[in-house]
Amino acid sequence: MAAVDDLKFQEFDDAANLLAANPDATTISIDEPVEIPKNQHSRRQETGREEDDELLGTDDSDKTELLAGQKKSAPFWTFEYYQTFFDVDTYQVLDRIKGSVFPVPGKNFVRLYIRSNPDLYGPFWICATLVFTIAVSGNLSNFFIHLGKPTYRYVPEFRKVSIAATTIYAYAWLVPLALWGFLMWRNSKVMNIVSYSFLEIVCVYGYSLFIYIPTAILWIIPQKVVRWVLMIFSLCLSGSVLVMTFWPAVRDDNRRIAVATVATIVLLHALLAVGCLAYFFDAPELDFPAPVIPTYNGTTGVTKSH
Amino acid sequence: FAGLADVSISEDIPVEGEITVPVGSRSPDDDYSTLDEPVRDTILRDLKAVGKKFVHVMYPKKSSALLRDWDLWGPLVLCVSLALMLQGGSADSKDDGGPQFAEVFVIIWFGAVVITLNSKLLGGTISFFQSLCVLGYCVLPLTMAMLVCRLVLLAGSGTVSFIIRLIVVAAMFGWSTLASTAFLADSQPPNRKALVVYPISLFYFVISWMILTFTPQ
C-alpha cells in the first residue's frame, strides 16, 4: 500500500549536506547553556576583574544573586541543605585565608573569593582555633611572666576557655547578624547596588579573624611594645579587609551614615582585640600580684586571733 | 507393583507422622540462641570485641573491623577513666583550676560529635556512629599518656619531669592523630582530606593540652 511507504522511516541527511542542497533554508542552532563550573578557581575571576576595579556592574550582582538562589534548593530541614554550606575544597579554603591575610587594595574579598559560594567551614573552625589559641597562649604567657616569683604556682585556668569561646563566637555571629539587619534596613531606603547575604557577611568576618591566630601566638612574648605593635598590625590587616568589603555597600547612602557604619565595624573589631589582650594576657614588667595559694602552715590565713 | 494399585486406607486409621523442615542456612545474627547462653559468655564476647579494637588502635593497619562492628563501650571506658584521672588537679578557686569531670566528658563527646558532623557535611561516606567509635577509641594513646604523667608526677614535679611528660604527651598526640587519620581518611573525598584531618588534630591537641597542664594539688 502506498500508505506503508509513507510511514517508512526517513533517514535525515547530515546538516551540512542539507544546507548545501538548499542554502537558503532557515537554520536553528542551540548552544549548550553556559554552565558555571562548581569549583571556580579564584584566579580566573581575578584576571577578568582587573579592568573592573570598581566592584560591580548591576548585571553582575544580579547574576551572583541568581546563582546564590539556584544553589540552595533543598528544604532547610534536610541534611543536604546544610551540605551546600560546606561545598569547598582544601585549596579554596586556603585561598580565602590567603585573601584575608594579604588584602589587595581595591579588590573586594567577597567578590574575589566567596563568589556566591559562602561556606561555614572557615568561620566555624577559624573561631574554634582562635578560642583555643588565645586560651593556650594566655596561659603560657602568664606562666613565663610569673615564672621566677616565689609565691607563684601554675594553674591551668581552664575556665577562661569557655569565656573565650563565648566571646569569639558571639562576635563572629551576632555582629554579622546586626550588620546584615542594618544593611537590609538601609537597602529598603536607599537603593544600594551592592548587597550581601547573611552568610557572606559571616564568611568575611570569620576569615578576617584568621590573622589573630598567629598574633595570639606571638603575644606570648612578654614585651608590651611588641604586643601593641602586633595588635595594631593585625588590626590594620583584618580591618582593611572588612572596610574594603563594606564600604561599597554603604557608600551610596548618606555620607554620615556610611562613615559611621564603617567606623563602628572597625571599632568593634579593635574592641575584640584589645579585650582579648587585656583579659587573657597579664601585663608584663609590672608588679602583677601572682595568684597566692594559702599555704598550710597558716601564714596567709585571715583568721584573727584575740 | 501392580498389587499396590488398589491399596486404600480406611478412614478409621489416623494418619500420623512427623513433618520436619530441613534447616538450611541459619540467619547470620542467630539472635535467638544468645538468649540461652550464660551471662559470662555474653560479657566475654563484648569484652573480646572491645579488646580487639584496642589492639587495632595501637597498631593501626587499614582494617575494616573497627569500622564495621562499631561499639561505644571502649570510648565510654576511656573517657570516664581520662576524666577521673584529670581530677584532683584543682587550685584553691574553681576558676583557675583544671577541667572538672563534666567538662572533660562534655569536651570529648561534644568535640567528637562536632567533628563527625563536620566530616559528614564535607561529603564523607562514613556513618555517624562509626566515626564516633573511631574517634573515641583513638583516645587510648592519650589515656595511656595520662597514666604515665600521673606516675611521673608521683616521682617529682620539676623541670625533668616536665620534659618527660612533654615528650610522652607529644608522642601520644601524634599517635592518636595518625591512628584516627588512618581509619577515617579513606571515607573522605580526596580533595578535602586536609579539611577533615585538621579538626581531628585540633581535638586531640586540646585533650593533650589538658593532660600536659595537669598539676596535682
Image (cartoon, rainbow, N blue to C red):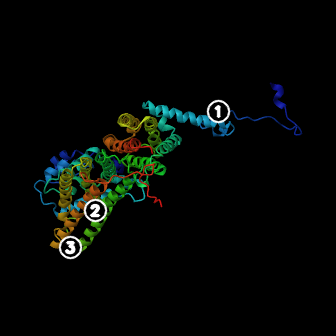
The residue closer to the viewer here, B95 or A234, is: B95
Residue type for callout 2: Ser
Numbered tag placed on residue B51 in the rendering: none
Spatial CA span between label 3 and label 1 = 79 Å
| Residue identifier under label 2 | A197
Q: Assess whether mark 1 and mark 2 are in contact (beta carbons under 8 angstroms).
A: no
The residue closer to the viewer here, A99 or A56, is A99
Number of numbered labels in the structure image: 3
Q: Residue furthest right?
A: B12
Q: Are marks 3 and 2 on the same chain?
A: yes
Give above or below for B156 relative to A26: above
Residue A28 appears in the rendering: no
Where residue B151 appears, as percent x and y from the top left, is: 46, 35
Give the farthest residue toward the bottom: A189
Name the kind of residue labelled 3 in the image. Val
Q: Residue at x 28, y 62 (%)?
A: A197
Q: Which residue is mark 3?
A: A190
Residue B24: quarter of image: top right
Mark 1 sits on what residue? Answer: B24
